[in-house]
Image (cartoon, grey):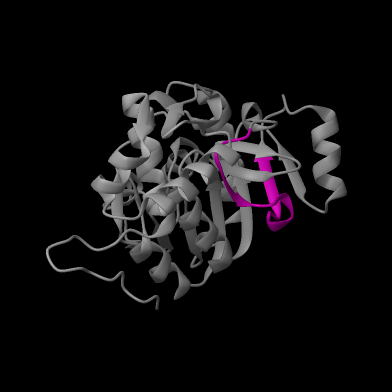
Amino acid sequence: MRNKPKTKAGDRPEMLIDERRQHILELIQNHGRALVSDLSERLNISQITIRKDLDYLQSKGAIQRSHGGALRVPSSALIDPTLQEKQKHNLQEKERIAAAAIKMVEEGQCVILDSGTTTTAVAERLKRFKQLTIITNAVNIAAELAGTDFEVILVGGTMRKNSFSLVGPLAEDNLEEMHADILFLGVDGFDMEVGITTPNLLESRVNRAMVKAARHVVAVCDSSKFTRRSLSRIVPPGAIHHVITDQNLPREIEEALRAMGIAVTLV
C-alpha cells in the first residue's frame, strides 16, 4: 500500500503529482490562463514546483507557457467528452465489437471492465452469463450489472463526472491486490508509436493498474481511435494482447499490429 498523502495543520491532504497536474490543467482549460503565483497560493506549494508542473504540461502539448504563467492550448488531444456525448458515435460498430468481445469470456471467469461506452456495451452483453466476477471503475457499469447474480467489485476512488469512472490512489491500490482473467479496455487514442492514451492523467494511472492486474488484455475500440493521441499514455502497444475493432481499420495498421504479435479481430 502507498503511504498516505501528508496533511498539514488546517490543510487538505496534499495531492499526488498527477492529481495536481490534472487539477492545474483543468484550471487553465476552464479559465484560459493561470499565473504561477496564483496557482502557488491556491495549491499551497512552491512556485518552483508549479513551474515544473507547467513545464511538464507544456512538454505534453497540453498548455502554452507564458511569462509568469500559462495559456490554454486548443487541442483534440485534450478533449474529454462526456459519456453521453460518446454514446452518440459509432453505435453499430460498438455493438459488433461487444458481440465479438464476449466470445472471449468463459463462465466463472473474472473480468475487468474499464469505463466507456464500448465497455458498457460489453457489460450489457455479459448478462447472458450466469456466474462471473466483474471488476470495474465505472459506476454506470456496476449499476447496469446490479440485477445479475454476478459478483460486482467497484475499485473505489473519486468519481469523474464526465465518465462516471472512479480514479485516484484508492482505485490504484485496490487493483494492485486483484488478479483477473481478462481486461476489456476502452481507449481514446491508439497510436502505433506511443500506445494507448487517454485525456485524463488520473484515468491513465487506473487503466495502467488494470493492465497489470489482468492475464489477458483486450483493447476494444472503433477504428476512429487509431492514429489519435491523447494527453496521457496508459501503456505501449506491446502491452496489449488482442484488439477488437471494426473493418474500417486501415490495412497497414492491421498489419503493423499483427507484426507486433497482437491478435486482431475485425467486425
- At 35% from the left and 32% from the top, the residue drawn is 34
| Residue 133 appears in view | yes
In the image, residue 245 sits, relative to residue 165, either above or below, namely: above
| Residue 127 appears in view | no
Label tally: 0
Front-most of 223 and 18?
18
- At 51% from the left and 72% from the top, the residue drawn is 179
Image coords of residue 171 (percent x, y): 37, 62
Quadrant of res 248: top right
Residue 256 on the magenta segment? no
Front-most of 56 and 138?
56
Quadrant of res 156: bottom left
Residue 236 on the magenta segment? yes
Q: Is residue 114 left or right of residue 189?
A: left
- At 24% from the left and 46% from the top, the residue drawn is 42
- At 72% from the left and 41% from the top, the residue drawn is 265
Image coords of residue 8 (percent x, y): 20, 68
Front-most of 40 and 155?
40
Q: Quadrant of the N terminus?
A: bottom left
Q: Quadrant of the C terminus?
A: top right
In the image, residue 265 sits, relative to residue 174, either above or below, namely: above
Question: Which region of the structure is painted magenta?
Answer: 229-244
The residue furthest front is 67
The residue furthest left is 10
Q: Is residue 236 left or right of residue 175?
A: right
Image coords of residue 43 (percent x, y): 28, 50
Front-most of 62 and 203?
62
In the image, residue 38 sits, relative to residue 145, either above or below, namely: above
Image coords of residue 166 (percent x, y): 34, 52
